[in-house]
Image (tube, rainbow, N blue to C red):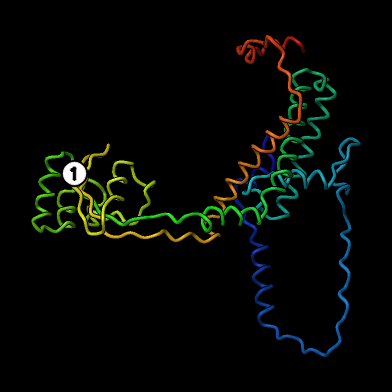
Amino acid sequence: MKSNFLSAAALGFAPIGLVLWGSAGLAQTAAEPAEPTTGTVEAAAPEAVPPYNIDSALAVVDGVTLTLGELIAIRRELPDQYQAMPDGVLFDGLIEQLVDQMLLAQAAKAAGLERRPAIVLNLLNQERATLADAYLRQAVEARVTPEAVEARYRQRYLDSEPTLEVRAGHILVETEETAADLKAQLDAGADFALLAAEHGTDGTVTQGGDLGWFAHSDMVPEFADAAFAMAPGAISGPVETAFGWHLIRLVERRDREPPALDEVREELMGELIQQAQVAVVEGLRMQSAIVMPEPPPPPRSIRDDAMLEAAE
């Protein structure tokens, strides 16, 4: 069964009304001159109390009330593409969908389906998952604060030793003999960029072998060890890696500038969230008594659907 809500979502509506309203508001603010100050400050008008709450009824289906709170709770869990829909489309679509669910759920209860073991267990699993997710979100939000992100940023980029990076070029060839021959030509005064463009076998040939700036960890160990052991202006002998044979020219060295906080904020937040999730769960495990009966059912028992169906 396809509802109008799903059909509307498939059309990919965007919140055009909201965008236009915001633009008009900004334009009006910019066009209107500021009121002159008279020295009298009027008290701000109290905010009007909305004429609705989470218990406001949206529909009554065979005596069962669908409330605004239920609608809001469902809307909060929708993917971004649904969140971007116009309020009217989203509101009407969710009501229609939830009314359909209420009708189906009431029919299921009338048929006694809520007493089936599979349904009882599914509801138990859903309740457990919802509560677990809510607690984990709350616990993580308390730990992953803006201050925690800034502290991680300082620790990693400002208080630690700066990362050394080098700028280098290379000529990558297939054999050691070819590399040795090119090295001899370089020692005799040949131009490194021209040889790289003519003989190189990787994507840097169009840049004369230039690799740009990189840290030691950015390259395979054999290449990085050779490059970081060189002095600026030097050209290495043949260096073998899994990609072939390299001649490396070191251009210059420097300490890498730390990135701005905004550039790495999402990355740092992701790390902190992952650490916080692990810490919360491990903390609960340490505080709890977890007993695994022995012997456990065999692993293949997890696929014994017939056992669940037989209990119905």
Query: Is 139 on the left-hand or right-hand side of 202?
Result: right
Q: Is residue 8 above or below residue 251?
A: above
Query: Is 52 on the left-hand or right-hand side of 75?
Result: right
Amino acid at the residue labelled 1? Pro
Residue 113 place in picture, x, y as percent? 80, 21
Disc tally is 1
* Residue located at (61% from left, 41% from top): 274
Q: Label 1 belongs to which residue?
A: 238
Determine which quarter of the picture holds residue 44: bottom right
What element does badge 1 sit on?
A: loop
Q: Quadrant of the C terminus?
A: top right
Determine which quarter of the picture holds residue 233: bottom left
Q: Is residue 265 above or below residue 108?
A: below
Q: Quadrant of the N terminus?
A: top right
Name the residue nearer the viewer: 122 or 204: 204
* Residue located at (15% from left, 44% from top): 179
Q: Is residue 278 above or below residue 23?
A: above
* Residue located at (18% from left, 57% from top): 193
Query: Is 117 on the left-hand or right-hand side of 26?
Result: right
Label 1 neighbourhood size at 10 Å, few (<14), some (14-19), many (20+)?
A: many
Looking at the image, the residue that sits furthest to the right is: 63
Name the residue nearer the viewer: 91 or 143: 143
Residue 139 place in picture, x, y as percent? 72, 43
Residue 12 place in picture, x, y as percent? 59, 50
Residue 23 place in picture, x, y as percent? 64, 70
Name the residue nearer the viewer: 249 or 139: 249
Name the residue nearer the viewer: 149 or 39: 149
